[in-house]
Image: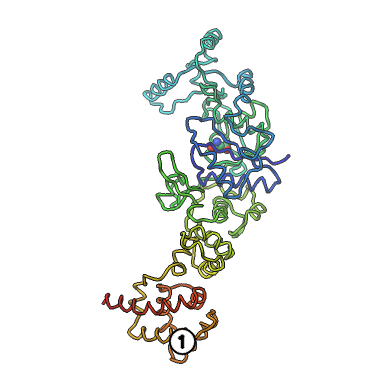
Amino acid sequence: MKVRVRFAPSPTGPLHMGGVRTALYNYLFAKKHGGDFLLRIEDTDQKRFVPGAQEYIIDSLKWCGIEPNEGVGYGGDKGPYIQSERMSMYQPYIDQLIESGHAYLAFDTSDDLERMRDQAKEMGLPNWQYNGVTRSSMKNSLSLSKEEVEKRLANGDPYTVRIKMPRNTDIKLEDEIRGWVTVNTNNLDDKVLVKETGMPTYHMANIIDDHLMEITHVIRGEEWLPSAPLHVFLYDCFGWDRPRFAHLPLILRPDGKGKLSKRDGDKLGFPVFPLDWMSAEGEKYSGYKEGGYFSKAFVNMLALLGWNPGDNKEIMSLEEMVELFTLDRVGKSGARFDPDKTKWFNQYYLRSTSNEDLADLLRPLLDEAHQGLETSYLAKICELMKERATFIQDILVEGDYFFNAVTVYDDKTVSKKWKEETPLIMAELLAELKTIKDFTTKNIETVFSAYLAKKEYGFGHVGPGFRLLVTGKGMGPSMFDICATLGKDTVISRMENGIDAINALKAANQ
Ligand code: GLU
């Protein structure tokens, strides 16, 4: 049988990185088995529908490179793939459940239900449930006479449809990650399958769609594990083959204390969403993309949040992950999110990106005045700076002297390294540099070394002042490379103007 898996988010807001991980594992599993990966939008809870969320989900999956091959926006012959467009398809199945005695109509209003809950609470039973014990005292098609039910229906009284959970029956299901799970039906309630509005609930629509879309494996977050017994019970009621289930572990906060929530990110200083999201209330949630992360780094990090390939391998392309992915290597316990590790992945991907590609990524970050810079110049800067950068933006910040005149000199370096004799040494070095015709890394280095040898100076005696003049900083890549990249005119003028500027600074600080 062809493997078919689905990612079935509800468009209730932006897609959390936990959701992206669920999509990723589904994608990896499908590709590994030569199967299909579907995107289905579960929007039966219209009250929680958030405009723009569906588009956000699709854009996020695209950015991550984990695109479905069937579903919303991708087509396929099992559509429509948006649940609110499938309403007419659900009714025959609901009727079937009622006719076979597995479901019944319940006329209780929300006030009735509240009253029952309050009464139970007063009697010391805080968790009142609509179930095999209580249903006989409620207003439903099992407790009311046939005539009464017909009268209510003719009258147009609103009703819900509930599952008739049997008493004291063990429901067993085998989870690919957790092994056998057994739940006794005495712990389950008669869940609503169809709301008063006629809209099926998540449970009903979800299993009918999984069946009709021929889903073979349901891979989803752990928060759905409590619903799984109801789901397998529904499959059994219909006499349908159950899909296999795999419930993924939670993603925990970096301190390990609880689930990583939507609000944690901006509070703790890292994104929890793939892309930026602006809520209707004007609240901004930051995303990995806009935060300067490579999607490859984000996806690589996510893959290892709950799964490992069996050795210590960490850097993996999507293709390698597909090759290595198995559900039996997904852990049961919560996976702690590590923002520093995520940065480490980004650093790795930044370093392994070609200088030309980095230049293309850098250009949109440059202001108008710098748009005329040649790509080869930007690529050279990227080559020099990438070992020191975690994000593309770091190249701009750390390498600002490649773009702008030096106006600020690092205080610490000025006070420690700009000695009394430094101005004279710099003037001598400047004179030597002026003699270079072809201002290449090699020629600059040769002249610089010859000067040190002639004067019997150590590098530390000359290097820091030289760097300070040309870059304003105390640290950075090779000065010879920097100078060759900046060009002779810029280096000479920075040295000429800088000596006096630093002298003045030094004097002012004394
Ligand atoms: N609509 C559910 C969600 O938003 C899907 C759960 C499932 O995959 O069955 O997560």
Q: Name the secondary structure under disc 1.
A: helix
| Mark 1 residue crowding within 10 angstroms, few (<14) / some (14–19) / many (20+) | some
Above or below, comparing residue 253 to residue 105 in the picture: below
Above or below, comparing residue 103 to residue 61 in the picture: above
Where, quadrant-wise, is the N terminus in this rendering? top right
Residue 145 percent coordinates (x, y) = 54, 9
Residue 504 percent coordinates (x, y) = 30, 77
Which residue is more in the foreground, 29 or 56? 56
Total numbered badges shown on the rendered structure: 1
Residue assigned mark 1: 432
Above or below, comparing residue 238 to residue 447 in the picture: above
Residue 417 percent coordinates (x, y) = 36, 79
Q: Is residue 236 visible?
A: yes
Residue visible at 51% across and 39% down in the picture: 53
Q: Mark 1 belongs to which amino acid? A: Glu
Which residue is more in the foreground, 298 or 493? 493
Which residue is more in the foreground, 30 or 447? 447
Indicate left or right for 347 with 101 as reference.
left
Q: Quadrant of residue 79?
A: top right
Where does ligand 1 appear, by image quarter?
Answer: top right
Indicate left or right for 409 with 402 as reference.
left
Indicate left or right for 369 with 374 as reference.
left
